[in-house]
Amino acid sequence: MSCCFIFSVNVVILVLLVVAFLIILQRNLLNLNDFLKHESAEAAPGALLPFEPDFAIKHKPDVIRTGVEIPVVITAAEERLGAALAAMNSVYRNSKSSIVFNIVTLNDSVDHLKTWMSKADFTGIKHKVIVFEPKILEGKILNDPQKKDEVKPLTFARYYMPMFLPSVEKAIYLDDDVIVQGDIQELFDTNLKAGHAAAFSDDCDSASSKGIVRGAGNQNNYIGFLDFKKEAIKKLGMRATTCSFNPGVIVANLTEWRIQNITSQLEQWMERNVKEDLYSKTLAESVTTPPLLIVFYKRHSSIDPMWHVRHLGATGAANRYSVQFVNAAKLLHWNGHYKPWGRLSSFSDVWDKWYIPDPLDKFHPIRKHSEDK
Ligand SMILES: *[C@@H]1O[C@H](CO)[C@@H](O)[C@H](O)[C@H]1NC(C)=O
Ligand SMILES: *[C@@H]1O[C@H](CO)[C@@H](O)[C@H](O)[C@H]1NC(C)=O
Ligand SMILES: *[C@@H]1O[C@H](CO)[C@@H](O)[C@H](O)[C@H]1NC(C)=O
């Protein structure tokens, strides 16, 4: 009995040794594979889309991730799924930190999103899918049947971060039309002053804003977003020339957000707007901005300008920024009409580096040369 027991223990040890050896061998082969990526079958030229200039960058092998987990909230709208995934890919590959993505989407897109996220490129990327229920916005947004497409429920997801992340203190919100080139840890480390629930990028004092909206009204200050002729706005005693901020990138203290009931304050301003029409008639940027401007008036911290380089989607963005400046930016935001997955965008080559093609083949970046064919 005991002889056989010892014998079988030896066999078990032997088997374990062989398995360990095979694992090490395979690891080494995999590393070699990464090294020789462009020669592997996976990266055969036929598998590359014509607009993918740099296969190696976005498929960088994973690193060992340490430190406190960074919660990132991003929305994924069906028609822009490719954008959210490119943004996440860029965040993940440029950081050594542990990150968890909280992807807010509508029920109809969950399957598509999950299929896409199950591609090998996203292996190891921690994420949760959160289903946004547009019912929550009832009575808070104008349902003008002629403008039905204009009010996108997911753009309001940022108002509800504490609800999505019930046990989180600090979190980052990112619009889907961004690419991150720095380590997101730096953005996460943005210092929020005591009593501030959020940090944003101000529209006046950054490299992004100089001369951007010349001739386009007052899109750098509060009067570009709110109707200062309305009693409800006047009563707040805010200066109309106060510099506005862009809520496409937010570093939030959700503890403070809860203490101040920021979400219900925002909802109240949405409801009042439905009744009293408080937003500026020339509102060019997101309809989510005006309530944030009111609630965070003189009560928010600032994000490093290089961590929110904006207006890449505006007309003439290519003339405004040098290639060197765009390369040095930590975060690029294509706010404006011309999205980097569209035909007329500036710096779409930067975005292409992070785009992972849709396995269901529904989302397609529009590129000049695909039109030529
Ligand atoms: C969500 O979508 C699934 C199918 O993807 C469907 O079965 C389910 O009924 C939907 N739920 C709601 C609340 O619409
Ligand atoms: C967040 O806000 C709470 C409440 O004001 C404060 O105690 C905490 O230190 C803040 N945390 C961070 C990371 O700023
Ligand atoms: C936040 O809401 C709670 C309950 O709705 C209320 O008791 C509290 O006074 C509110 N706090 C602020 C600062 O408005």
Image: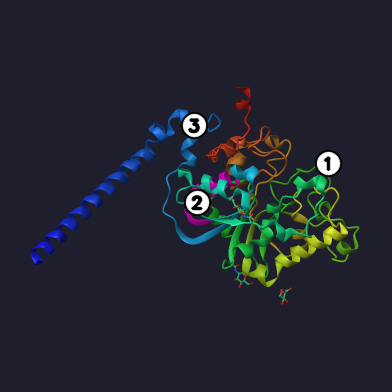
In the rendered image of this protein, does residue 140 appear above or below residue 18?
below
Residue 140, image x, y percentages = 78, 59
Q: How far apart are marks 1 and 2 (CA)?
A: 39 Å
In the image, is the residue at mark 2 within 8 Å of ligand 2 by its beta carbon? no
In front: 67, or 144?
Answer: 144
Residue 324, percent from left and from top: 60, 38
Using a 10 Å C-alpha cutoff, classify the residue at mark 1 as few (fewer than 14 neighbours), some (14 to 19) or many (20 or more): few
Asked if residue 53 can be seen in this view, the reply is yes
Which amino acid, mark 3?
Leu
Quarter residue 133 falls in: bottom right
Give the residue pinned by disc 1.
215
**Residue type pointed to by label 1:** Gly
Residue 159 location, x and y as percent?
69, 60
Label of residue 175 in the image: none
Q: Name the residue under label 3.
A: 48
Q: Is residue 87 magenta?
A: yes
Categorize mark 3 by other alpha carbons within 10 Å: few (<14), some (14-19), many (20+): some
First in sequence: mark 1 or mark 3? 3
| Marks 2/3: CA–CA distance | 25 Å
Q: Is mark 3 on a helix, strand or loop?
A: loop
- Asked if the beta carbon under badge 1 is closer than 8 A to the nearest atom of ligand 2, the reply is no
Q: What stretch is highlighted in magenta?
A: 84-100
Amino acid of disc 2: Ser
In this figure, which residue is indicated by the disc labeled 2? 95
Total numbered badges shown on the rendered structure: 3
Magenta span includes 198? no
